[in-house]
Image (cartoon, rainbow, N blue to C red):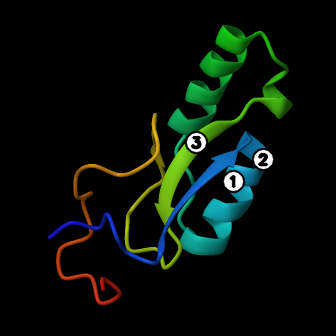
Amino acid sequence: MSCENCLNLKVKMFTFGDLRKKWNEIYSPDSMTEGYEKRLRRESLKQNKPFERTRLKFIYCSKGMLNRFYIIRGHSIIKTKPGMQGCQFYL
């Protein structure tokens, strides 16, 4: 099964604050791991931008079927992500 054409799969650019807000909407009460902040801090240094304005492109399931947000380079998802087996929303 591929989730490439799923209507609930979203691609969006997030700052850390926006990412945390969206995470809490989808996965609350589970808290976000510190790896996202570390990755955005590294990207901030790489881009020579303030941390608060640094953004990365993420792919996520708006219904919470994936267990995390995935950082992506490019335009689309290539492989099935963990959590998509037997997804009730897949079309």
- Crowding near pointer 3: few (<14 within 10 Å), some, many (20+)? some
What residue is shown with label 1? 20
Q: Residue at x 62, y 53 (%)?
A: 12
Q: Is residue 79 left or right of residue 51?
A: left
Q: The residue under label 1 is which amino acid type?
A: Arg
Q: Between label 3 and label 1, give the one nearer the viewer.
A: 3
Residue 57 tag number: 3
* Percent x, y of residue 59: 48, 54
Q: CA distance from mark 3 to mark 1?
A: 14 Å
Q: Is residue 30 above or below residue 20?
A: below
Between 30 and 74, the residue placed more toward the observer is 74
Query: Do residues under tags 2 and 3 come within 8 Å of each other at their CB atoms?
Result: no
Residue 17 tag number: 2
Mark 3: which secondary structure? strand
Work out whether residue 71 can be spotted.
Answer: yes
* Percent x, y of residue 27: 54, 70
Q: Is residue 42 above or below residue 84?
A: above
Query: Do residues under tags 2 and 1 come within 8 Å of each other at their CB atoms?
Result: yes
Mark 2: which secondary structure? helix
